[in-house]
Image: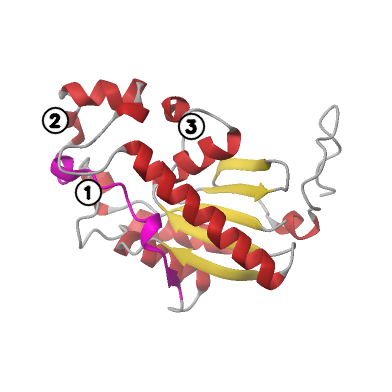
């Protein structure tokens, strides 16, 4: 089966400022974020990628272009940030005082941002986009295809929750840091979550990973190196 590397963009200027930037234009990587993207590119560079697909927002495009080493990155609108509506551009410490904050933390499946979208709708579109691209790239390049999706923290968390069979209300248990790589492989019977929130380590072992089949009782031997 194809392998998707879910990459969160590097640290942004809004991350440092503690602002929920959402879909606001002009939010770029800061110096740390560019270094994170370069480190991620080095880790991924050992793999023969068939595609790098990105959220259209600047911080993701900048990360994706560093990974791809050229500007020919495919943009996917359904991987863009959640539409936070009236929350966009506000300080996180201010938003934490809003009644909706506790809903986002404990019952995200019920959260609808004022003037924006629901978290359930965010998950539905992002999961559908990842699965659609994964199936198309596998059909075109074979079951050894490896591709990258560069997107946002809540998007990746929602995709991982789906792959893990978790209810959306549990997705806040997942951590996805800037510049991190999470790995999912969609099998015929179930997805396999290979790794989450990694920020270091050689990924060349993925070239020898076999298709998702029956789970190894006891956990299996793992990569040979």
Neighbor class of circle 2 (other Cα within 10 Å; few <14, some 14-19, many 20+) is few
Spatial CA distance of label 1 from label 2 is 14 Å
SS for callout 2: helix
Of the two numbered discs 2 and 3 on the same chain, state the one appearing first in sequence.
Answer: 2
Q: Residue at x 66, y 49 (%)?
A: 186
Question: Residue at the spot x=81%, y=57% of the render?
Answer: 208
Classify 10 Å Cα crowding around label 3: few (below 14), some (14-19), many (20 and above). Answer: some
Magenta span includes 145: no
Colouring of the image? secondary structure
Q: Is residue 143 above or below residue 188?
A: below
| Residue drawn 36% across the image and 29% down it | 109
Q: Mark 1 sits on what residue?
A: 21
Locate residue 75 relative to residue 217 in the image: left or right: left
Q: Which residue is mark 3?
A: 174
Give the residue number, with chain letter if any, for mark 2.
94
In the rendered view, does 213 fall on the left or right side of 80?
right
Image coordinates of residue 43 in percent, x first then y, are 60, 59
Answer with left or right where residue 123 lies relative to residue 187: left
Q: Are marks 2 and 3 in contact (CB under 8 Å)?
A: no
């Amino acid at each position: 089966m194809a392998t998707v590397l879910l990459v969160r963009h590097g640290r942004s200027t809004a991350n440092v400022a503690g602002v929920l930037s959402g879909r606001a234009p002009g939010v770029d990587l800061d110096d740390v974020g560019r270094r994170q993207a370069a480190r991620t590119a080095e880790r991924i560079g050992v793999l023969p990628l068939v595609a790098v697909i990105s959220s259209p927002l600047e911080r993701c495009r900048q990360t994706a272009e560093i990974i791809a080493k050229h500007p020919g990155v495919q943009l996917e609108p359904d991987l863009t940030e959640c539409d936070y509506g009236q929350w966009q551009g506000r300080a996180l410490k201010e938003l934490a005082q809003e009644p909706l904050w506790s809903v986002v933390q404990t019952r995200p499946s019920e959260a609808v941002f004022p003037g924006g979208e629901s978290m359930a709708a965010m998950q539905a579109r992002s999961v559908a986009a990842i699965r659609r691209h994964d199936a198309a790239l596998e059909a075109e390049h074979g079951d050894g295809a490896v591709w990258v999706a560069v997107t946002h923290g809540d998007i990746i968390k929602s995709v991982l929750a789906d792959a893990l069979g978790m209810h959306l209300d549990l997705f806040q248990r997942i951590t996805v840091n800037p510049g991190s790589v999470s790995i999912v492989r969609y099998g015929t019977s179930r997805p396999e979550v290979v790794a989450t929130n990694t920020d270091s380590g050689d990924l060349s072992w993925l070239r020898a990973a076999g298709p998702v089949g029956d789970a190894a009782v006891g956990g299996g031997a793992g990569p040979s190196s």
